[in-house]
Amino acid sequence: GAVVSQHPSRVICKSGTSVKIECRSLDFQATTMFWYRQFPKQSLMLMATSNEGSKATYEQGVEKDKFLINHASLTLSTLTVTSAHPEDSSFYICSAVHIIYNEQFFGPGTRLTVL
Amino acid sequence: AQSVTQLGSHVSVSEGALVLLRCNYSSSVPPYLFWYVQYPNQGLQLLLKYTTGATLVKGINGFEAEFKKSETSFHLTKPSAHMSDAAEYFCAVSLMNTGFQKLVFGTGTRLLVSP
């Protein structure tokens, strides 16, 4: 139980295009989901907190107009990287907070490469 | 604000040897502490966590960690390393009054296991 999926697992796009990444809690509900970014051989940096039915809360230095987050249901949050540029290339990981256990479960990550 | 310091970006051990990964934290309030493992191109898997109570915490795969408040440490150990333990390990802290939410991660330690 407590499985979180991300789709796609890998995506390659051209500079200037937008990319949507989905994060789903498959067997539990999550009022809160988190989006992290991980650069090669570095730690996870929290980008934003996604709350179902409300606006996301972004960490300092994260452009909310560039990284659009939507948490439309208790099992789905999406991250859209708008007008992607090569510097946006990274490994994006989401986590979902189990509504009962109040514990974060992590997705497998999405590797974004912007050419 | 909370912070986590992991000493040593790389730790190398021989198969069967003791594994010791160091983690020190800084928090103005009692923390929740976590250790996660990450295999290449994958998300994070929880190894163990400390919330309250017993300071020696046992986790999966034979790992354990001890919360030492006086030393502000939460070092991860395993008596005998296995080849499959080779991975990236992250220590994380969360504010107790926010439960398990909003984790702050250390920079990670890569464990290398040689035959």
Image (tube, coloured by chain):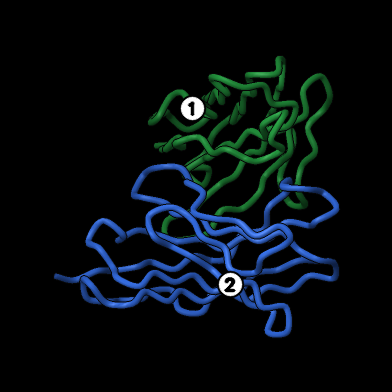
Chain colours: A green, B blue
What x and y, as percent, mark residue A74? Answer: 70, 18
Vertical placement of residue B55 versus B45, above or below? below
Task: State the image quarter where residue A22 is shown.
Answer: top right
- Number of the label disc, if any, that sits on residue B39: none
Q: Residue at x 58, y 72 (%)?
A: B66
Vertical placement of residue A48 versus B23, above or below? above
Of residues A68 and B89, the one drawn nearer to the viewer in this rendering: B89
On-image quarter of the C terminus of chain B: bottom left
Disc 1: which chain?
Answer: A
Q: Amino acid at mark 1?
A: Gln
Tell me if A113 is positioned left or right of B82 in this view.
Answer: right
Instruction: Say if mark 2 contacts mark 1, CB within 8 Å.
Output: no
Q: Residue at x 48, y 26 (%)?
A: A5
> What is the crowding at mark 1: few (fewer than 14 residues within 10 Å), some, or many (at least 20)?
many
Q: How many marks?
A: 2
Q: Residue at x 39, y 69 (%)?
A: B78
- Asked whether the viewer can see residue A58, the reply is yes
- Badge 1 is on which residue? A6
What element does badge 2 sit on? strand
What element does badge 1 sit on? strand
Q: Residue furthest left?
A: B115
- Number of the label disc, if any, that sits on residue B66: 2
